[in-house]
Image (cartoon, helix red, strand yellow):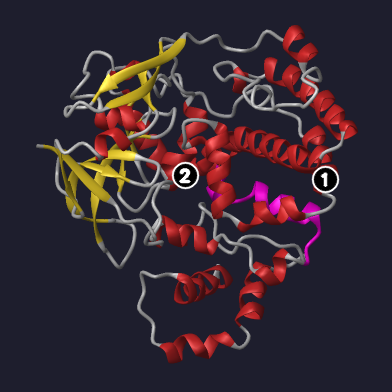
Amino acid sequence: MVKKLFAFLLTLTMTSSSLVVADTEVNEYSADSNTIIENAWVQLDGSYDYPITALDSEWDALVSVEDMRSVTQIPNSILHKISTEELLELILDYSLLCDIHAYDSIEDGYYQIKNQFNGISEMLDREDSIVVLLNAYKAYNIPRQKILDYTSIMSGDDYIENYNNFIHNPENHELIYRDAAVYETIDILEMLLKDVLESKGSSNDMNRFAEAYAVKLEQKNKSTYYKTTNPVQVLQLIQEEEGQLYTALFEENSYAIETVNNNYVISTPGGNTATCIYDTNFEYADPSTYSSLIAKYHASQVSIASKTFNCHSFAWLQDLYPNTYQYLTLLSVGPFTSDPSYEKSSTAKIGWIVLYSQHSGIVTQTGMDYPYDTVNYPEAYIISKWGSEPIVAHYEKHNPYYSSGQNLKYYHLK
């Protein structure tokens, strides 16, 4: 714990824009900073592991999601010398791997992690990445039974309060993260394989993946983890040049969830047109997939929500289209932000829509102190829909969508 705390303080000193440190103090560590940081990652048996994880108390004191990302970046001195197998272990243990479920699709979530975590780009550059990933994918056996049963927690009139009490109890976090790790492991392995196979995979590699994927489909079909989750979602994303490689898999496995959806054109208050996807397949996300997200970001669930609408629909359409917004996925907010009917501000105001680079929410409070840190920089409190997951209340800088380089913008219908 002493080593982790030291690494935590040092990393914040060197990387966090939230703390002001004199140049002389930074330079004092600069000469051998790589060695110091690397030592914090070395375990007693010589293996490498994160100095701070979401299970450590130091995690709570991180001022923003940017600090969470900073302390989980693999130091370059380690990144380029470890084996590909060791690199994959660090990727699978990445505390923010949960972000893969924070967006409208697994693919969107993967590309966000790819842009934020240096372990992914290093894996894609490795010559033996396909072999290592395929071996790990084939070796991983999907458990048949979940660890946690949310049925009792999510029942009754007080289910939201009961759920939040359960999620906010640190004694439950290890089990929550272990359950979520099943989805996260399979999803990141499948998306990494999709990425490397499309860029440098041979026909033989593609066939080996198809065979392994067929085995995983059978495991998913027998597992309670996938009773409410579409097990072929990655297969549907993969496009093979000859167009025949996966035909048999689609014919032999009827796991795909049919969805009735069409393009749906709406109007902004000022008359701009916006395109949505209209979806009538009212389906709810499994708490096992998103509870890790809520716990790690110290957020709270406000209500369950179907997968038929996204964060932009929730923020921009619920007042304009109260009877239909829950069936609409708003593809772009550009028609709304360019509409002069909306007042624009760079300051958070209660009731206004907050726009991140790829996320929308509604400001419910301002000037709030994040209760887990000792610095207490005031920030707004937001309610928003997290991808295909539920409606969540969270701090403005403690969520998967925030980055310090963003200029958050706020909008309000005049």
Q: Is residue 58 left or right of residue 319?
A: right
Q: Position of residue 285 (x, y in %)?
A: 46, 23
Q: Is residue 321 left or right of residue 97?
A: left
Name the foreground residue: 30 vs 286.
Answer: 30
Q: Position of residue 329 (x, y in %)?
A: 38, 24
- Residue under label 1: 132
**Rendered residue at 56%/85% (across/down):** 30
Q: Is residue 387 left or right of residue 128?
A: left
For the question of whether residue 57 can be seen, the reply is no
- Residue projecting furthest to the left: 414
State the CA–CA distance, disc 1 to disc 2. Answer: 34 Å
**Callout 2, which amino acid?**
Glu
Q: Is residue 54 magenta?
A: no
Q: Which residues are magenta?
A: 81-97
Query: Which quadrant holds the C terminus?
Result: top left
Query: Which quadrant holds the N terminus?
Result: bottom right
**In the figure, 306 relative to 355: above or below?**
above
**Callout 1, which amino acid?**
Val
Name the foreground residue: 134 vs 173.
Answer: 134
- Residue under label 2: 171
Mark 1 or 2, nearer chain start: 1
Quadrant in which residue 282 is drawn: top left
Q: How many marks?
A: 2
- Classify mark 1: helix, strand or loop: helix
- Classify mark 2: helix, strand or loop: helix
**In the figure, 181 relative to 380: above or below?**
above
